[in-house]
Each structure stands twice: as C-alpha cells, then as structure tokens.
Image (cartoon, helix red, strand yellow):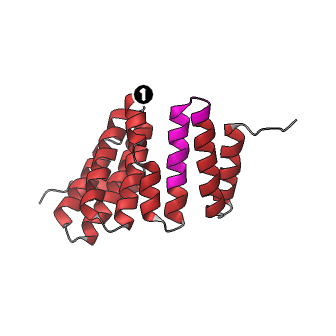
C-alpha cells in the first residue's frame, strides 16, 4: 500500500525548501500542494499555495511566471470574503509587475492590495504595501505621490512604533 502525502505535508515540504533557499524545490512543491488542495476541494488553500509559489518564483527571478501563478487567486479570496489574503495576492502580483518594469500595473495592484488590506483591518500589512508603493513612486521621481502613499499607510496605525511616530511627525509637518 502506497502512503500518499496529505496536501498539508506537501505544503510543509515546499515551505522547508523555500526556507532552505531551494526555490526550485519550493516552486514544484507549492504547485503540487495547490493541485492536492484543489483535488480535495479546498479552493482557498489551493489559491494560497499558488501565491506561495508566486513568491518562490519571484525569489527565483521568474517574474512573469510569478504573476501568472498568482493571477486569479485574488478573485477566489474576494468571493470567499478573505480580504487579507486578497490583499496579499494583489501585493504579490504588484511585486511581479514591478520586477517586469510594468510600473503602471504595479501601482494599480499595490493600490488594490492596500484597499483590500484596509478592508481587512490589516494596518501593518497595509503600511508595508504603501511603503512599497512609495518606494516605487520615488524611483519614478514622483515625490508628492510617495509622500501621500506613506501618509496614507501611517495614518491608520493604532499603535505606531517610535520610528513610525517619527515618520508621522515628519510627513504631517505643516510649514
């Protein structure tokens, strides 16, 4: 009798590969886990594995494949009311678009990611997305847009760190 691995065991092996820096192993493992979860009828976990695969692909410098891997997963999360994972999927897609130098698309995906994370109440994750968006604006010499993005990310924080409080004071300083 053959002992078949569960989707969770496959996902754990893929995570171990990723943590060890074996991105090819992680890519293949997450693809297998996505298929295994889909076969079990768990569309949410299948989409989660596709997003994990997307991150591994991006680390392996395969930006187009990273985008394709996560494409459509944001809809699955949205349809199931999972705003947090929808935001994460959109942020993964934004990162892939940025790596492909498709900056307008990246800005759009980062903006949508921030909206989903805001809806989920994930202020810290939203701040991270807004910082990525601000960095993208800065690289494109759009200082005003970068400041607005940072302000937007910081304003919703309930318990900012000392560094974040300092940033808030700087960014909201009135002349």
Measured from the top left, where is residue 46 in percent x and y?
A: 54, 39
Majority SS type along the magenta span: helix
Residue 52 part of the magenta segment: yes
What quarter of the picture does the N terminus occupy? top right
| Residue designated by label 1 | 80
Image check: 69 left or right of 174?
right
Membership of 43 in magenta stretch: yes
Outermost residue toward the left?
Answer: 175
Which x, y percent locates residue 51? 50, 48
Query: Closest to the observer: 112 or 45?
Result: 45
Which stretch is magenta?
38-54
* Residue 121 in view in this figure: no
For label 1, the crowd category at 10 Å Cα-Cα, with few meaning under 14, some 14 to 19 and many 20 or more, is few
Instruction: Name the residue at the front extreme.
Output: 1
- Reply above or below: 78 against 159: above
34 over 94 or under it: above or below: above
The residue at the far right in this view is 1
* Residue depicted at x 19% and y 67%: 142
């Amino acid at each position: 009798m053959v002992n078949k691995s569960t989707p969770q065991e496959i996902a754990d092996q893929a995570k171990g590969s990723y943590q060890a820096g074996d991105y090819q192993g992680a890519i293949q493992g997450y693809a297998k886990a996505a298929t295994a979860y889909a076969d079990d009828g768990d569309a949410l976990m299948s989409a989660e594995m596709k997003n994990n695969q997307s991150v591994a692909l991006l680390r392996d410098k395969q930006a187009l494949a990273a985008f394709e891997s996560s494409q459509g997963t944001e809809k699955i999360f949205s349809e199931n009311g999972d705003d947090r994972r929808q935001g994460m999927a959109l942020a993964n897609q934004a990162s892939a678009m940025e790596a492909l130098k498709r900056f307008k698309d990246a800005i759009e995906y980062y903006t949508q990611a921030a909206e989903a994370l805001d809806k989920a109440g994930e202020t810290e994750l939203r701040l991270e997305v807004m910082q990525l968006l601000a960095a993208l604006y800065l690289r494109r010499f759009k200082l005003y847009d970068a400041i607005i993005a940072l302000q937007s990310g910081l304003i919703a924080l309930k318990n900012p760190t000392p560094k974040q409080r300092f940033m808030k004071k700087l960014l909201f300083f009135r002349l």
